[in-house]
Structure formats: C-alpha cells, structure tokens
C-alpha cells in the first residue's frame, strides 16, 4: 500500500492508494501536525494511536489488513516548520522501516498555479517545455489571486514524484 501526504498547508491531506496507485480513501485533518503525524504513522505501523484524528471511513481503511510500502509527499513549498517536521518523520520511517519515499512539490496536490505564501506574496508554478521535457520552476512573486485548495488525486502520477528527498525552500524575493 502507498500513502500520499500534503502536510505543508492546513488542512493536511492524506491519500491511501493501492499497488496500482489508485486511490482507496482520502481524508484531511487539522490541528498540530506533530500530533496528526504521530496518529497517522501509529495507525499505519499498527501501533497504539489516537483514533479521534480519523473519521469512520479512514479508520476502517487504516485498521484493515494493509502494509505500508511507500510514501509520496509534498516536500515544499509551505510552512517551514511543517517541511522540517515532515522531512524528519519521513526520513526516520525510511531509515528504520525501509519505507520507500517519493517527493514532489506541493503543486502536485493543487489545481492552482498559485499558493499563498505570506503578506502580499504567493508561490507560482511556472512550467516550461524544453527539448528534454517539461520543466517546473517555483517562484515567489506578488499575489494575483491567492486562493488555492488541495486534494488527493484519484491516481498518483508517479512521474511527478522524482524530486530530491529534502525540503524545498524558495528564497527569491522581489
């Protein structure tokens, strides 16, 4: 089983996927990320966890006969503390449990090309077609329409999750 995570901007999103990367269930949660991740990984690893974080459908999937093999996640952009916490938690799972990690930017979980950053600034996804293929670049610019929503795709496009397994920091200020 595969899990996808968007833990950078609340409400946090979780998707549970089959071996063919088709979504079985998805849910969101709010609150402190550290507590939410602890509950999620406790459930996925069949350890003691706080069931109050999950609705009935999510709980039935999490308590089913599943074995966590890989995690696809947003490595940035977003809340810096959330990026660091997510990175540390996932690297710990990778090193201690052998779970495979795959990373992309947060735009893999948004239909918008703009994500609110701070003040009057937003992160923008700029895509460019080159001979080698499509190039994605994220820039920090003045906001146009800073409304964005996040979702778990029906099918994971694994070709989008080939970025480095490290937090993504964007620092190009205008």
Image (cartoon, grey):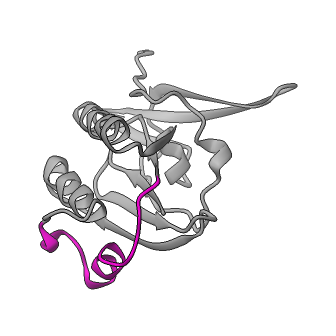
Left or right of 5 in this view: 113: right
Q: Nearer the viewer, residue 125 or 87?
A: 87
Magenta part of the protein: which range?
A: 50-69
Left or right of 103 in this view: 31: left
* Quarter of the figure with residue 116: top left
Q: Nearer the viewer, residue 71 or 130?
A: 71
Q: Residue furthest right?
A: 131
Q: Nearer the viewer, residue 67 or 172?
A: 67
Expressed as whole percent of the image width and height from the top left, the position of residue 18 reads: 55, 68
Left or right of 9 in this view: 174: right
Query: Which residue does the image show at 30% across and 62% down from the upper left?
Result: 44
Query: Which residue does the image show at 64% across and 65% down from the upper left?
Result: 20
Query: Which residue does the image show at 19% across and 56% down from the upper left?
Result: 36
Left or right of 121 in this view: 139: right
Expressed as whole percent of the image width and height from the top left, the position of residue 147 reads: 42, 52
Expressed as whole percent of the image width and height from the top left, the position of residue 136 reads: 64, 31
Query: Which residue does the image show at 52% across and 44% down from the upper left?
Result: 107
> Is residue 51 inside the magenta stretch?
yes
Work out which quarter of the rendered image holds the C terminus and state it: top left
Q: Is residue 127 above or below residue 33?
A: above
Q: Is residue 10 above or below residue 1?
A: above
The total of numbered circles placed on residues is 0
> Is residue 154 inside the magenta stretch?
no
């Amino acid at each position: 089983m595969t899990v996808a995570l968007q833990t950078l901007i609340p409400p946090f999103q979780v998707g549970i996927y089959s071996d063919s990367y088709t979504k079985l269930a998805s849910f969101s949660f709010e609150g402190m990320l550290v507590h939410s991740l602890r509950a999620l990984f406790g459930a996925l690893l069949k350890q003691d966890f706080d069931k109050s974080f999950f609705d009935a459908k999510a709980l039935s999937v999490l308590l089913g006969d599943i074995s966590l093999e890989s995690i696809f996640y947003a490595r940035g952009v977003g809340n810096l503390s959330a990026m660091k916490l997510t990175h540390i938690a996932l690297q710990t799972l990778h090193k201690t449990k052998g779970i495979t990690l795959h990373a992309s930017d947060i735009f893999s979980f948004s239909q918008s090309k703009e994500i609110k950053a701070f003040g009057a600034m937003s992160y923008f996804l700029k895509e460019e077609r080159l001979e080698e293929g499509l190039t994605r670049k994220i820039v920090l610019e003045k906001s146009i329409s800073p409304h964005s929503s996040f979702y778990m795709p029906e099918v994971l496009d694994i070709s989008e999750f080939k970025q480095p397994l490290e937090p993504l920091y964007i620092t190009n200020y205008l």
